[in-house]
């Protein structure tokens, strides 16, 4: 393949970039951090996308073990003035990816947080037998963002989308296929051949159809509980109603989910439901703009929960429960929720309309 990295400015070595015929292959290349995406990587991918509009864009990894473990951002090490630019770049990248018509993500191995947002911004998405897909932002004092509220709220099974939005449960490859998170299921051993054939034939849809398989439903990990998920999370109006449903279920699964939600950041849980309901009737671009404002609140303006979670889980490596504020779901007020959603102090983001 023709390597063009040196022809573009700001292309990080953490992003592998190759182009041949009408295809561009972008591979995340940060194995020591499980491809956690940092600011330079967001800039690099945005620049590559901007120079290759209209081509087949394939997102993958240099490792079969992980697509991306999420975003690499430590609020204690970043200037407050730089936070808006970091998220502006991330959101703009998702906006560009979603606008392109021939985009493919290959979700091999760990796919989490911003990795999920990147993957689901693509029109075509491959899951494999090694896929591990989860959005765990509610356990970090954040909410699933960068388009995940839109994606979950527009899934065919809305109850399942809300369940994933709130709990961050981990799906395997067959789960992703049957939940319509992935559009195709292909064996790990065939991925390289699929990419090569797409490049050679310049036929994304045809090649995906040729190699795609249908995994057995019995292989699903999360969807084995889909009937209970539908019963509990279907048409939920508010968190109070959800908690009451979970208490009434009287099943092992219901108790597990209730305990799981109780351990998450209470404010994040409430905001996540509101984001889900907001995004259900909006287009992707509007949802991205909303996500930006929410992140400005939760990462910059009112960042106690996020900063505390990062310190406890990743710096001090404390396995105990994070001391959230407020500490329980019952203590969350409407004023707290509305402040996060409205982002009164700003900054705000208006994304441009894109055209070919």
Image (tube, rainbow, N blue to C red):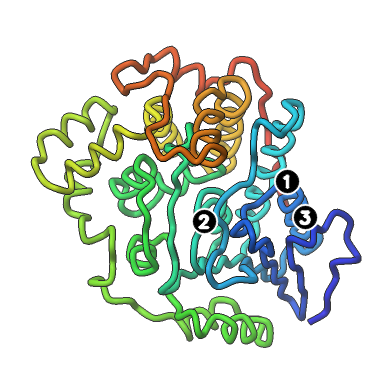
Distance of label 2 from label 1 (alpha carbons) = 20 Å
**Percent of width and height locating residue 311:** 55, 33
For marks 2 and 3, give the CA distance.
Answer: 19 Å
Marks 3/1: CA–CA distance? 9 Å
Query: Is there a contact, CB below 8 Å, between mark 2 and mark 3?
Result: no
Residue 184 appears in the picture as rendered? no
Tell me the element at label 3.
helix
Q: Quadrant of residue 281?
A: top left
Measuring from the top left, give residue 240's x and y in whole percent: 24, 25
Mark sitting on residue 39: 1
Q: Residues within 10 Å of mark 2 (few under 14, many from 20)?
A: many
Write down the quadrant of residue 167 in the picture: top left
Please report the residue visible at 27 percent of the width from the left and 71 percent of the height from the top: 219
Question: What is the secondary structure assignment of the residue under circle 2?
Answer: helix
Q: Residue at x 58, y 31 (%)?
A: 295
131 lies above or below 153: below
Compared to 292, does 212 lie above or below?
A: below
Residue at image x 56%, y 63%? 67
> Earlier along the polypeptide chain: callout 2 or callout 1?
1
Residue 121 position in % (x across, y down): 56, 54
Q: Which mark is residue 57?
A: none
Q: Which residue is mark 3?
A: 44
Q: Secondary structure at mark 1?
A: helix
Q: Which of labels 2 and 3 is toward the front?
A: 3
Contact (Cβ within 8 Å) of mark 3 with mark 1: no
Percent coordinates x, y for residue 36 in the rendering: 62, 53
Q: Horizontally, is 221 left or right of 93 in the view?
A: left
Can residue 286 be seen in this snapshot?
Answer: yes
Q: Which residue is mark 2?
A: 120
Q: Nearer the viewer, residue 142 or 352?
A: 142
For the residues carrying marks 2 and 1, which lies nearer the camera in this image? 1
Quadrant showing the C terminus: bottom right
């Amino acid at each position: 393949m023709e390597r063009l990295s040196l022809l573009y400015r700001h292309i990080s070595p953490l992003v592998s970039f190759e182009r041949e015929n009408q295809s561009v292959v972008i591979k995340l290349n940060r194995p020591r951090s499980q491809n956690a995406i940092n600011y330079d990587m967001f800039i690099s991918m945005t620049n590559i996308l901007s120079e290759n509009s209209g081509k087949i864009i394939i997102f993958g990894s240099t490792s079969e073990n992980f697509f991306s473990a999420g975003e690499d951002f430590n609020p204690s090490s970043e200037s407050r003035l730089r936070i808006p630019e970091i998220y502006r770049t991330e959101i703009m990248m998702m906006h560009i990816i979603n606008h392109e018509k021939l985009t493919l993500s290959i979700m091999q191995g760990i796919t989490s947080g911003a990795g999920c947002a990147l993957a689901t911004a693509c029109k075509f998405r491959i899951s494999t037998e090694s896929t591990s897909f989860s959005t765990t932002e509610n356990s970090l004092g954040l909410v699933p963002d960068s388009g995940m509220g839109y994606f979950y709220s527009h899934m065919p099974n809305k109850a399942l989308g809300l369940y994933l939005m709130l709990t961050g449960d981990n799906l395997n490859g067959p789960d992703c296929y049957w939940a319509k998170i992935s559009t195709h299921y292909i064996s790990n051993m065939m991925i390289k051949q699929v990419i090569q054939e797409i490049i050679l034939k310049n036929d994304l849809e045809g090649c995906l159809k040729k190699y795609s398989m249908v995994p057995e439903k019995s292989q699903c990990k999360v969807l084995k509980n889909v009937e209970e998920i539908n019963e509990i999370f279907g048409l939920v109006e508010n968190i109070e109603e959800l908690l009451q449903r979970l208490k009434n279920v009287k099943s092992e699964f219901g108790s597990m989910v209730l305990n799981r939600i109780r351990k998450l950041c209470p404010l994040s849980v409430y905001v996540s439901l509101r984001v889900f309901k907001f995004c259900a009737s909006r287009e992707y671009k509007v949802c991205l703009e909303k996500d930006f404002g929410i992140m400005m609140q939760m990462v910059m303006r009112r960042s106690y929960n996020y900063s505390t979670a990062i310190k406890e889980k990743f710096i001090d490596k404390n396995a105990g429960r994070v001391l959230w504020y407020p500490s329980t779901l019952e203590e969350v007020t409407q004023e707290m929720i509305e402040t996060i959603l409205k982002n009164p102090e700003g900054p705000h983001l208006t994304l441009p309309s894109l055209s070919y």
